[in-house]
Image (cartoon, rainbow, N blue to C red):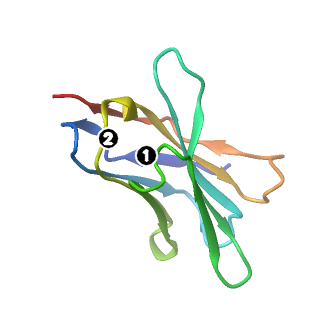
């Protein structure tokens, strides 16, 4: 059972920055897909950013709404995935969840419990 623990959420003013961390209970070097999702009140959970393991390089992709403002990265030595968020907007307010799909087949996937991000003045 893979465990994911998010941290780094909080209250930030519009235009501010936050970095979320997701510590994984096992080595992430061979996990096929790691991602961040978010869910705002009354809305469905949506993909924010994803990093997919390739043979030589990792592939990243983002939701259009965050593409120029958020950066996903991972540090294999620390079994940690990060989401750097800048130029935050009130509409970024949500619970942010870490996600892992070790095989890439979506047959066994794992979620963290989430961390709250609130963007408000």
Mark linked to residue 6 = 1
Residue 25 to residue 96: above or below = below
Task: Tell me which residue sits at (80%, 47%) in the image.
Answer: 106
Mark 2 is surrounded, within 10 Å at the Cα level, by few (under 14), some (14 to 19) or many (20 or more) other residues, namely: some
Of all residues shown, which one is farthest toward the bottom? 56
Helix, strand or loop at label 2? It is: loop
Label 1 close to label 2 by CB (< 8 Å): yes
78 relative position to 18: left or right = right
Q: Nearer the viewer, residue 5 or 82?
A: 82
Residue 82 to residue 118: above or below = below
Mark 2 sits on what residue?
9
Residue 91 to residue 6: above or below = above
Residue 113 to residue 55: above or below = above
37 relative position to 120: left or right = right
Quadrant in the picture for residue 58? bottom right
- Provide residue 48's location: percent of width, then percent of height: 53, 45
Mark 1 is surrounded, within 10 Å at the Cα level, by few (under 14), some (14 to 19) or many (20 or more) other residues, namely: many
- Provide residue 112's location: percent of width, then percent of height: 53, 41
> Which quadrant is the C terminus positioned in?
top left
Task: Tell me which residue sits at (52%, 73%) in the image.
Answer: 76
- Provide residue 2's location: percent of width, then percent of height: 64, 51
- Provide residue 20's location: percent of width, then percent of height: 37, 51
Of all residues shown, which one is farthest toward the left? 121
For the residues marked 1 and 2, what is the alpha-carbon distance in whole angstroms? 8 Å
């Amino acid at each position: 059972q893979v465990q994911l623990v998010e941290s780094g959420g909080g209250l930030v003013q519009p235009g501010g920055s936050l970095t979320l961390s997701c510590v994984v209970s096992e080595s992430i070097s061979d996990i096929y897909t790691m991602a961040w999702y978010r869910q705002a009140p009354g809305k469905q959970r949506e993909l924010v950013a994803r990093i997919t393991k390739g043979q030589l390089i990792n592939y990243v992709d983002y939701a259009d709404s965050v593409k120029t403002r958020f950066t996903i990265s991972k540090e294999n030595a620390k079994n940690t995935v990060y989401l750097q968020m800048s130029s935050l907007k009130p509409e970024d307010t949500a619970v942010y969840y870490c996600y892992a799909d070790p095989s890439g087949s979506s047959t066994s996937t794992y979620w963290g419990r989430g961390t709250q991000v609130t963007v408000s003045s």
